[in-house]
Amino acid sequence: LDTKRKRQIEVKNTSEAIIYDIEKNLREHREKLPAASVTKIETALKDLKAYIQANPDNFDEIERRTQEAQKIQIDAFAPMYSGGQASN
């Protein structure tokens, strides 16, 4: 039981940190992203939070969905970091 609880805490903390970072980046750079990218990120975050709330013990799926949300963010921000400027 301790191992399961430890894993639950680790997965929850990692997911919460990633969600926080994605939300922070979105707040800071929203105007630099196309509206479709903003919507995609917001939807991924909403879905991830709802999944975690409904399935707190499904660690593997929470990790997978967290990585998926992180990838959506990375893909959306890639043009900004590669020197290109995303436009609305």
Image (tube, grey):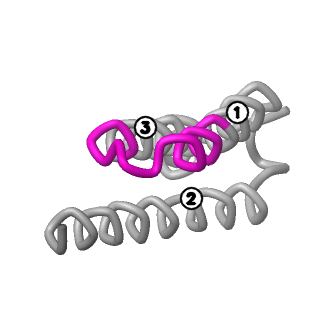
Relative depth, front residue between 12 and 74: 12
Element assignment for label 2: helix
Which residue is labeled 3 in the image? 65
Please state which amino acid type lies under the numbered disc 2. Ile
Which residue is labeled 2 in the image? 19
Vertical order, 22 against 61 (above or below):
below
Which residue is labeled 1 in the image? 43
User: Disc number at residue 34?
Assistant: none
Instruction: Tell me residue 18's x, y (percent).
Output: 48, 61
Q: Where does the magenta region start and end?
A: 47-62
In the rendered image, residue 41 lying in the magenta stretch gets the answer: no
Relative depth, front residue between 35 and 51: 51
Please state which amino acid type lies under the numbered disc 3. Arg
Instruction: Tell me residue 63's x, y (percent).
Output: 33, 46
In the rendered image, residue 52 lying in the magenta stretch gets the answer: yes
First in sequence: mark 1 or mark 3? 1
- Tell me the distance, in whole angstroms, between the alpha carbons under discs 1 and 3: 12 Å
Identified at 74% across, 41% down, the residue is 33
Instruction: Tell me residue 38's x, y (percent).
Output: 75, 38
Label 3 crowd bin: few (<14), some (14–19), many (20+), radius 10 Å: many
Vertical order, 53 against 24 (above or below):
above
Q: Describe residue 20's horizontal placement relative to residue 4 as left or right.
A: right
Element assignment for label 1: helix
Identified at 68% across, 59% down, the residue is 23
- Tell me the distance, in whole angstroms, between the alpha carbons under discs 2 and 3: 11 Å
Label 2 crowd bin: few (<14), some (14–19), many (20+), radius 10 Å: many
Vertical order, 72 against 56 (above or below):
above
Label 1 crowd bin: few (<14), some (14–19), many (20+), radius 10 Å: few
